[in-house]
Amino acid sequence: MKRIIVTLSVILFTCTLYAQPATKKHVVKRGETITQIAKKYNTSNNVLFLLNPEAVKGISRSQVLQVPITSEVQHKVQAKETAYGISKQYNISIEDLYQLNPGLEEYGLKVKQILNITGADSFKNTIIVQPGETIYGIAAKNNTTVSELYEINPELRVGSLKEGQVIKLPVNDDLRIDQDKKATVFSQNAKTIIVKPKETIYNIARTNNVTQQDLLKWNPRLREGLKEGDTLIVGLYQTAIPVESETTVAEVNQGERLIDANKNTIKELVFLLPFNLASNNFSNPSVYKNIQSNMFLNMTLEFYSGAQLAIKDLESRNYPLNIRFVDSKETNRSLDVQSLKSDFDFADTDVIIGPFFQKNVDAISEAFKNQSTLIVSPLSTSEGKPYPRQIHAMPSNEIVKKEMLKFLKTKQQNVVAITDEIKTPRNFFNSNLPSAKVMTVKRDEKVSAGDLRKLLNNTEVNYIVYDARSLTTSIELIRTLKDLLNEYKIYLVGLEKNDILDSSDISIDDLIALNYTFPSVTNDSDNLRKSNFHSKYMAAYGKKPTRFATRGYDVTFDVILRMFKSNQDAKIFDSTTQQTENNFSYTNENGGVYNTAVFILYYDKDFTIKEAR
């Protein structure tokens, strides 16, 4: 069965228990054990450890122990406690608590008040804190939450957790949270926004983690263009919030399934994700506000939720795999590789997914260059440094452009490239598509119909590859191309997603009329595979997946499948695979391994995005 072992590195709390049975002294005799003493006084080891914390490390002859002489228990009320919480703490009904304490129901609790818990089996559901355990790990291990532990153990809110400490656990099953569902919860609020100057549909969709199709569905008037000051509906604003993700390491093991497996076949996958626990205290409610405003943290948690779902979906395959989630503590400026290597043992790690920033991936690759570990860069589009064991899961911007030109080359039609040479120089077209006719434009320069006619062909499809960043040039070019549609068959093509074409001054109807075609690292078209994943994610987390959640799922699912495809590590990234929104087709180039799988998409007449064939 699946086991989740959580090791945490956080500031926690100590305990001074306020409810204890009446006691007397017992002098330990030679050869006596804690179990024998418990049996003698009709109690349990846990109760003796509660009364004598030092006994957890062992007892010795002539040591004086406190032992219970009665089963009666009293509770001293602490600040902010509730009758409900106390009843759960002692596993009795609230009605019994009221009956045992006349006047409690009528007048309520008072701080330092002594309550009778006579007859309650107060230590029936307790554990003893083991070396290295934390409140978060205990909650995860016992299928409960930190908040429930605080509710029935109010003394945990101060100090630090100690080995041998007794912790009470909730016993009411209807209050427990399913282990598989509690890793992430979501806050959902209906949201509207006011369009700011120079905002585009693309930017609004990306900022609010929704698709452009959804924006059009919620706001049909967007088909007429985006206007400053417009009020837009942005559906449900959803944010991932970890319940017990204040985690330095989480291991997912196959438990009993590995007993008969060849030990040498067990593989290890490590995620280096930037939870940055030192600055993000997930036990503090203020972190919820930080998640709303901190896009980097939000992205991390979304990626993590997708990865967890992929791991769950692969459980049935019984792979002999250990998985660890490690806080990389990275920023866009730095990552302390040496601290990571000293804090965690990577000697048996087969694959590392992460970090997020490419220069940090390069730093990890450099640190592990003398061992066989494969390093997967999951999100960066930067080419970085070429390492033979570094896998670029996200196609770089250069690859995206080249794949678009390769697609056009297969069409064997007339290609006209218009560039301002800011992002794409003229010689890029000469090198990658020599047959293209290239026109350079200056900023705000208008392209005349006469100049275009000299380059167009009235017997072929004319692909106009547009790569300029001037709004004026863009608006005028689209007007001119629309006028020329009466004479020529024209497709407007982008080398990458161009924010300018999402301007409120450019109508989506015009882009549809021009069959606007562009490359993308994700498949934004609607398909059955994506629909099934969205339904699965919605069932698990109660919200639609963002592109980072989907990316986390696809990269994780793909990497794990590849790890068990071949015993030769160097060949596990040879094949082409298709996942939910991302395809993976790797090639060795300039000493590195790069994903070249790019989708060619276009705007269809039904206002949806489809994949070009």
Image (cartoon, rainbow, N blue to C red):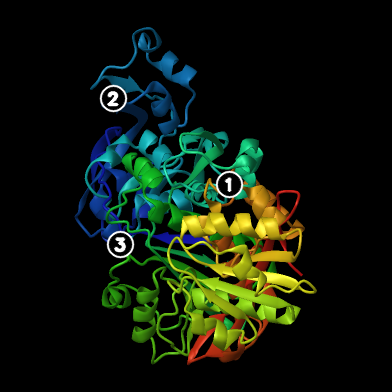
The dot on residue 31 is: 3
Q: Position of residue 128 (x, y in %)?
A: 37, 51
Query: What's the residue type where badge 1 is placed?
Result: Tyr
**Residue position marked by numbered label 2 in the rendering:** 77
Front residue of this view, candidates 13 and 334: 334
Query: What's the residue type where badge 2 is placed?
Result: Val
Crowd band around label 2 with a 10 angstrom C-alpha radius: few (<14), some (14–19), many (20+): many
Tell which tag, 1 or 2, sits nearer the viewer.
1
Front residue of this view, candidates 103 and 435: 435
Q: Position of residue 364 (x, y in %)?
A: 37, 79
**Residue position marked by numbered label 1 in the rendering:** 541
Mark 1 or mark 2: whose residue is earlier in sequence: 2
Residue extending furthest toward the right: 459
Tell which tag, 2 or 3, sits nearer the viewer.
2
Is 21 situated left or right of 422 in this image? Answer: left
Crowd band around label 1 with a 10 angstrom C-alpha radius: few (<14), some (14–19), many (20+): many
Query: What's the residue type where badge 3 is placed?
Result: Gly
Q: Position of residue 308 (x, y in %)?
A: 55, 59
**Distance of label 3 from label 1 (alpha carbons):** 55 Å
